[in-house]
């Protein structure tokens, strides 16, 4: 089955067999390996990407459902090699440790900040409920979001 969709602002055409996940297309066919394969059950959030601006677990998202849609991966968050304000804040606060979960957190939190540029801490905690981090204890991640919010005011 041939699919056409946009990834990080670029139109792509891929031929994929039925039953293929968006994660498999992104990592395999398109070599966008920033999106991580974690649990493959939609529980850890490492594979989170934006589909038409909404975060989804790409390990569960059928590739054929991406037809005609706009996909944003972690590779599409920075601009001209410059980290986004959120990415910079994650580095500054120590919210990036081993880094495996970081792409999923960045995608999820980018969507939150697009929808709500001034979330309170409880809203940030609610947004990341589907993302698991084994290193940070979440405090630094939440601090990074709040720093981003404060810097944007």
Image (tube, rainbow, N blue to C red):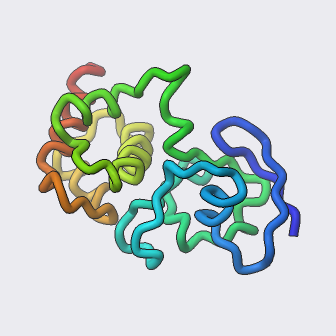
Which picture quadrant has residue 26? Answer: bottom right
Q: Is residue 68 left or right of residue 34?
A: right
**Residue 11 x, y percent position in the rendering:** 79, 42
**Residue 117 x, y percent position in the rendering:** 35, 34
Q: Residue at x 37, y 73 (%)?
A: 43
Q: Is residue 50 above or below residue 147?
A: below
Which picture quadrant has residue 75? Answer: top right
Q: Residue at x 26, y 36 (%)?
A: 90
Q: How many circles with numbers are drawn on the protein?
A: 0
Q: Is residue 137 above or below residue 149?
A: below
Q: Is residue 26 above or below residue 40?
A: above
Q: Is residue 54 visible?
A: no
Q: Residue at x 21, y 36 (%)?
A: 144
The quarter in which the C terminus is drawn is: top left
**Residue 76 x, y percent position in the rendering:** 56, 37
Q: Is residue 58 left or right of residue 3?
A: left
Foreground pick, 30 / 54:
30
**Residue 121 x, y percent position in the rendering:** 17, 46
The quarter in which the N terminus is drawn is: bottom right
Q: Residue at x 20, y 28 (%)?
A: 92
Q: Is residue 127 left or right of residue 40?
A: left
Foreground pick, 63 / 152:
63
């Amino acid at each position: 089955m041939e699919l056409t969709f946009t990834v990080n602002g670029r139109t792509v055409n891929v031929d994929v067999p039925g039953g293929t996940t968006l994660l498999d297309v992104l990592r395999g066919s398109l070599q966008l390996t920033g999106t991580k394969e974690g649990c493959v059950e939609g529980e850890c959030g490492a594979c989170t990407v934006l589909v038409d601006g909404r975060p989804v677990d790409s390990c569960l998202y059928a590739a054929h459902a991406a037809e005609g849609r706009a996909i944003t991966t972690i590779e599409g968050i920075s601009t001209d090699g410059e980290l986004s304000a959120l990415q910079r804040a994650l580095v500054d606060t120590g919210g990036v440790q081993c880094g495996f979960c970081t792409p999923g957190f960045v995608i999820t939190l980018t969507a939150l900040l697009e929808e709500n540029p001034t979330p309170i801490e409880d809203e940030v905690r609610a947004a990341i409920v589907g993302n698991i981090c084994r290193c940070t204890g979440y405090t630094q991640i939440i601090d990074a979001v709040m720093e981003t919010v404060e810097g944007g005011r």
